[in-house]
Each structure stands twice: as structure tokens, then as C-alpha cells.
């Protein structure tokens, strides 16, 4: 294979994937409503971080557009661990609430992992409760973490073959890399991959990414994945990002676009599919609560 690459990679945008998911969710919400259930996704915001407040507004608007109820609890920035636990408990106990989202990040004096543990697994819309991750590991149905689920859907939507191919996931975090590796190794037409996970404990990780058919960056270190780390023609998915103020800094160096065969755009790739999967999980939890 030639190292001389002049082509520009095919873009893999997330928006059309998200629209397809929203169309399916709209139908499922309508069916629930017709049967007398208004699906409800509750949101919890702690503090006044403008970016987090913006994400909550965006999700509430989307919830309204799709036909969900979206009760909201806003706790002050100095809320205690007990205050947050009480808020989550009240939503756990409310039969009209089917899904609970605690907006990340929460103030530093609070423990996000502990808050996630407090959520009733039957209302775990992020799919990050240990019970949900355990179900994923066991191959049982349940809410799947949104970003990994969105990446599987994105590859399938754009016709990128995954089954039988070498996928290398850079990063083993609980939100992204680890559940994604489990998901893409599952026995299913849109998965079934030979998955390798590399991380900071594998200093020569490029040895693995360079032979991969599909490389998925899930780190949060801007520009960590460069052209010399990928095989010409490989499919590249950028999942990891870091925010500096409002500026989004992706893991994937822009120059990869000249080497990859297909690549997610720097903005509008994995993000829209993540939000869409949140609503797919929410409608699924409402269906489960109604027809367990
Ligand atoms: N686009 C979206 O909608 C979306 C949604 C969720 C998450 N994300 C992003 O995805 C990224 C990962 O999230 P996460 O929660 O899974 O993160 P995380 O828990 O911080 O995991 C990061 C992983 O990257 C590895 N890593 C860090 N520096 C490295 C280096 N220099 N070389 C090789 N590996 C390195 C870490 O290795 P060790 O395990 O050895 O420490 C760890 O496995 C973050 O940027 C997050 O913002 C995006």
C-alpha cells in the first residue's frame, strides 16, 4: 500500500445518524403516549456552570420536541452530598419518572461516581451504573453508555464494516473506551470485531493503531492521534475531546483527514449521536417500566 496519500477522507457526520434515531424514538414515544404513558426524562443540575446549564437546556428542548416530559431539579453549587442523594432518591421514588440524568460535571466537593451509584439502575439513562455496565459485560439487554452506542450506530449508518475487522480503541475510560470495546466485540452484525484496547500503560500503542482497520480515539488529550499513528485508508473515529472554555479540542489531529479513508468531523461527529442515544435509552427505560 502506498504511503503517498493525496485523498481526503470521507466524512462520517453524526447528524444524519442522530436524525434516524430521533425518528425511531418519536414513534416509540407516540406509542407509549397512545397507551397512556408519558415518558419522562428527569434532569439534575448542581451549580451554575453556564456550559452545563446550556447542555440541560438543549436536552430539555430535545425532550419536548420528542414528546418526553422533562422534570428538572436545580441544586445550588454548595449542595451537600446528602442534598444530591435526596434529590436522586426523590426521582427514584417517583413512578412518573422513567430516566434520570445527573449533568456532568458536578462541583468538585461532590462525587459523581457516588451520585451515579445512587440512581436506580432501572432509571439509569446514561448506562453508566455498575449494574448497566455489568449487563453489558454479560451480554444482557439494558441501557448502554451513550457515546459507545452512538459510535456503533454511526459506523453502521455510514456502512463502515466492523464485523471481523481489527478495531483499536485508544483509551480504557469507564465512559467511553472500556464499554466501547465490550460493545464492538459483541456477537452482532454491527459489531463482531477483533478489538484491541490500548492506553497509557502501552507506551508504544501506535504499533497497534498503525495496523488497525478502524481506530477510535477515546482519550481526552488534544491531537494525540496523528497521521503517523494510522494506516493510510483506515477509518478514524474521534470520541475524546477536551474543552478549553467553549473551544473543543479533539483527540484526532486535523492532518489525519489526509491519510484516513473515512473520518468523523472535528465538530458534529460523535457528539450528536451521544445525545440521540440518551433519548433512545430514555424511551427504552419507559417501555421497560410500562411493560417489564
Ligand atoms: N463526544 C462525546 O459526546 C463524549 C462523551 C463522553 C466522553 N467523551 C470524551 O471521551 C474521552 C474519554 O472519556 P472517559 O471518561 O472514558 O475518560 P478517562 O476515564 O479519562 O479515560 C481516558 C483514557 O485515556 C488514556 N490515556 C490518557 N493519556 C494517554 C496517553 N498519553 N496515551 C495513551 N492513553 C492515554 C487513559 O489511560 P489510563 O487508563 O492508563 O489512565 C484512559 O484509559 C474524554 O475526552 C471525554 O471528554 C466524549
Image (cartoon, helix red, strand yellow):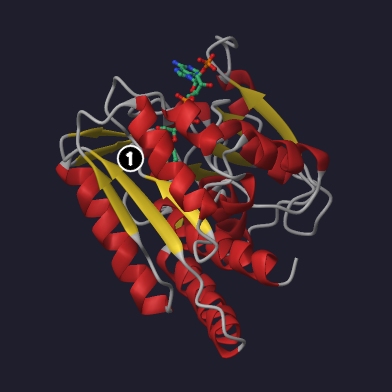
206 displayed left or right of 71: right
- Identified at 44% across, 32% down, the residue is 227
Report whether residue 33 is seen.
Answer: yes
Is 235 in front, or is 103?
A: 103
Q: Position of residue 44 (x, y in %)?
A: 34, 47
Q: Position of residue 157 (x, y in %)?
A: 59, 66
- Identified at 50% across, 58% down, the residue is 94
Quadrant occupied by the C terminus: bottom right
218 displayed left or right of 104: right
Establish if 43 lies above or below 232.
below
Mark 1, Cα crowd under 10 Å, few <14 / some 14-19 / many 20+, is some
Which residue position holds label 1? 254
Establish if 119 lies above or below 229.
below
Q: Is mark 1 within 8 Å of ligand 1?
A: no
Residue 183 occupies quadrant: top right
**Disc 1 on helix, strand or loop?**
helix
Quadrant occupied by the N terminus: top right
What is the residue that sits farthest to the bottom in this orientation?
34
Q: Position of residue 152 (x, y in %)?
A: 62, 53
Q: Position of residue 111 (x, y in %)?
A: 40, 24
- Identified at 76% across, 37% down, the residue is 137
11 displayed left or right of 139: left
Is 177 in front, or is 94?
A: 94
Amino acid at each position: 500500500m502506498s504511503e503517498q496519500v493525496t485523498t481526503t477522507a470521507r466524512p462520517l457526520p453524526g447528524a444524519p445518524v442522530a436524525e434516524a434515531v430521533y425518528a425511531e424514538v418519536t414513534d416509540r414515544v407516540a406509542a407509549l403516549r397512545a397507551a397512556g404513558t408519558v415518558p419522562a426524562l428527569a434532569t439534575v443540575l448542581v451549580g451554575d456552570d453556564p456550559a452545563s446549564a446550556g447542555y440541560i437546556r438543549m436536552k430539555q428542548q430535545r425532550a419536548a420536541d420528542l414528546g418526553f416530559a422533562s422534570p428538572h431539579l436545580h441544586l445550588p453549587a454548595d449542595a451537600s452530598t446528602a442534598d444530591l442523594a435526596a434529590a436522586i432518591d426523590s426521582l427514584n421514588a417517583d413512578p412518573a419518572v422513567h430516566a434520570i440524568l445527573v449533568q456532568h460535571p458536578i462541583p468538585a466537593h461532590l462525587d459523581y461516581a457516588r451520585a451515579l451509584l445512587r440512581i436506580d439502575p432501572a432509571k439509569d439513562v446514561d448506562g453508566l451504573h455498575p449494574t448497566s455496565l455489568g449487563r453489558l459485560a454479560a451480554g444482557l439487554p439494558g441501557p448502554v453508555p451513550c457515546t459507545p452506542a452512538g459510535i456503533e450506530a454511526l459506523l453502521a449508518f455510514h456502512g463502515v464494516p466492523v464485523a471481523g475487522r481489527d478495531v483499536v480503541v485508544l483509551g480504557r475510560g469507564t465512559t467511553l473506551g472500556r464499554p466501547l470495546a465490550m460493545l464492538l466485540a459483541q456477537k452482532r452484525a454491527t459489531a463482531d470485531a477483533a478489538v484491541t484496547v490500548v492506553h497509557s500503560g502501552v507506551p508504544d500503542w501506535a504499533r497497534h493503531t498503525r495496523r488497525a482497520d478502524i481506530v477510535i480515539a477515546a482519550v481526552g488529550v488534544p491531537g494525540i492521534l496523528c497521521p503517523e499513528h494510522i494506516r493510510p485508508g483506515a477509518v478514524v473515529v474521534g470520541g475524546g475531546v477536551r474543552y478549553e472554555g467553549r473551544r473543543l479540542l479533539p483527540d484526532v489531529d486535523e492532518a489525519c483527514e489526509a491519510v484516513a479513508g473515512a473520518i468523523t468531523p472535528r465538530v458534529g461527529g460523535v457528539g450528536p449521536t451521544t445525545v440521540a442515544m440518551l433519548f433512545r435509552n430514555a424511551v427504552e427505560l419507559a417501555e421497560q417500566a410500562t411493560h417489564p
